[in-house]
Amino acid sequence: MPFHSLRGLASIADDRYLSVMRTVAALLYDDMRAFDYGVIVEIWGVDRSDLEVPRFELRLCSAGARSVRLNPSAWVDATHDLSGFAGADLVIVPGRFEPFAPVEPDVIDTLRGAFASGTTIASLCSGAVVLASAGILEGRRAVTHWELSERLFDDYPGIVPERDMLFVEHNGVWTSAGTASGVDLCIELIRRAHGSRVANIVARCLIAGSHRTGDQAQFIKNPLPSSTGRKSIAGTLDWARGRIHQPLTVADLARHAGVTPRTFARNFVATTGTTPGQWLIQQRVFEAQRLLEATDLRIDQIAGRCGFGTSTMLRRHFTRVVGMAPSAYRGAFQRT
DNA sequence: CTAGGACCCCGCCATT
DNA sequence: AGAATGGCGGGGTCCT
């Protein structure tokens, strides 16, 4: 199965391109989080070509190609030294348990070089500190684990701080809040490069929720569906997804749930981490992605079927959420 | 692109 | 008291 080429498609607000992404270089260094290592290997290191997922070349790069010590304790062998960053489509920097400990100058230089050459760069958890110390986050929106936010943003005032996000992208640089949200970030990277169909397959393999978007809060007060109301939030979400082609409003959802809009919105945020209106838009965009990939419907027909009244509305929200226009998305990902 | 009306979101407070 | 709810206002976003 050929790779879809994204060359020539602009990422958000920048001329940096998310290229085809088949070579992924991960930084290995001492004290790195075993979980982050696991995420990287699980996402890009497992051959799922039998499920029509592109095969990736995963390079595990450390200074001098030395073995590194994971935390909690394990040793991992590198496959490349730092020259493995060259020519990669994505460089990914995992977190450490001592995030502010100094990093070898070679690593910083190599990261800067990769960034300067236009490579997409992503950090997991406290890996954002390494990006910051390389100057890569200067002037960019970034997020990190909530326990590190204050110090990171104090130490590097040039960063545009984001706090209530799971992950964020700014001009080809991606940062994620930590641990589990790294999975969400990695799946989103795959979605951008290979489409939501492939991303959903990978998410399914990981038994991960494939629809956690970056703009959700890091804290979800009540992660289990509350059944205290007449009908659960989850039930209302299913109901709404089943009629996403209709012009639903937040008031409609509240009515279905049997509570006032104020209470509904409050419970909704506590349960899902996002607001009802944003969730609706997100669901409509998901449906639009599905239709763009799987059908030949015109853009205005798709707008009607996913609940956007007009193609203008579809284009506006789609571009904001996905990072490219609907037509470009179809050109890259439509199954023929 | 702009305008203005509808809708959404959130803090605040009273009520249950 | 403490928790959950619902009403209200205004500032922001969305939509026609």
Image (cartoon, coloured by chain):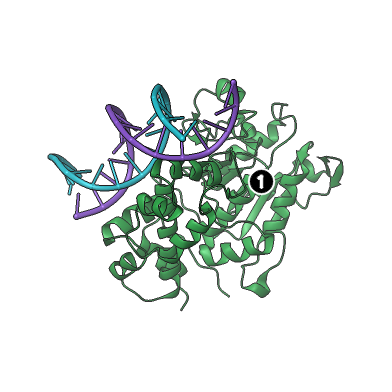
Chain colours: A green, B cyan, C purple
Q: Do we see residue A284 in this rendering?
A: yes
Residue A323 at least partly seen: no
Residue A21 position within the rendered picture, expressed as x and y whole percent measured from the top left: 57, 58
* Image position of A312 with respect to A31: above or below: below
Is A236 placed left or right of A36 in the picture?
A: left
Left or right for A97, reference A231:
right
Report whether A265 appears left or right of A144: left
What residue is rendered at 40% in x and 75% in y? A295
Residue A304: where, in percent of width, then height?
Answer: 31, 66
Name the residue located 71 percent from the left edge and 27 percent from the top edge.
Answer: A102
Front residue of this view, candidates A219 and A172? A219
Which of the pair A85/A305 is nearer the observer?
A305
Chain of residue at mark 1: A
Q: Nearer the viewer, residue A219 or A300?
A: A219
Quadrant in the rendering for residue A310? bottom left
Q: Position of residue A208 (x, y in %)?
A: 64, 57
For label 1, the residue is A180
* A76 is higher (above) or lower (below) than A1: above
